[in-house]
Image (cartoon, rainbow, N blue to C red):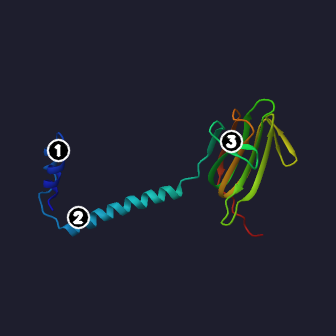
Amino acid sequence: MNLRKITLRYMGWCPGVHSVAMWIPNKEYSNRRVFASSMTVFMVIIGVSLLYRSSSKPSSVSWDIEFTEAAYDDAMDMYVVEKRVNLDGDYNISIWTDSAAGESCFIRWLYRGPVRDQLHQEWIITDGVIRCSLDEYGLHYSEPRSARASTVWMIYSNSRDQKVHIRIQYLGEYPVRQPP
């Protein structure tokens, strides 16, 4: 395999390639040697991309949910939108709505398990006021949480005109618990 001939054959249409090709040795290389070099470069590229992907921090998530195209859930008697995200670390979760009088919303945060989903948190929003368990948060909910799982968010609304805003902001790695 002659690299100069291959370069001129496939890239000869490009201006200046003839003068650059003179710098490539006019020498025959074995196919085995070219294959080994190509595979080495390919493996380095794959390794670097996997290393970058595994070392990059989890990203934040921002959802502005509208129910105009949402499916209707007969069991809840509400419109429903489902969102999925993998969480691994500490996050700040913020929730608020653009709602009118009489509109209500229900949000379930579920951990995706191997057998079934497990409930992690629920929020009830009526006339824009957010309630979680027995606590009332007002018009805006914002609280840090730790999560380390694949999660499903089920967002229900009794109105197609309602908008729900959910921000899941990555704060840092999940803390490692040290034994006492």
Q: Which residue is mark 2?
A: 34
x 80%, y 30%: residue = 101
Q: Nearer the viewer, residue 138 or 107?
A: 107
Q: Are marks 3 and 1 in contact (CB under 8 Å)?
A: no
Residue 112 figure quarter: bottom right
Q: Is residue 151 above or below residue 34?
A: above
* Residue placed furthest toward the front: 74
Say which label, 2 or 1, has the lower sequence index. Answer: 1
User: What's under tag 3, amino acid-wise?
Assistant: Ile
User: What's under tag 1, amino acid-wise?
Assistant: Val
Label 3 and label 1: CA atoms lie apart by 54 Å
Image location of residue 130, percent across then percent down: 80, 40
Residue 36 figure quarter: bottom left
Q: Which residue is mark 3?
A: 166
* Residue placed furthest toward the right: 134
Image location of residue 110, percent across then percent down: 71, 55
Q: Residues within 10 Å of mark 3 (few under 14, many from 20)?
A: some
x 62%, y 45%: residue = 61
Q: Secondary structure at mark 1?
A: helix
Quarter that holds the N terminus: bottom left
Say which label, 3 or 2, has the lower sequence index. Answer: 2
Q: Residues within 10 Å of mark 2 (few under 14, many from 20)?
A: few
Quarter that holds the C terminus: bottom right
Q: Are marks 2 and 1 in contact (CB under 8 Å)?
A: no
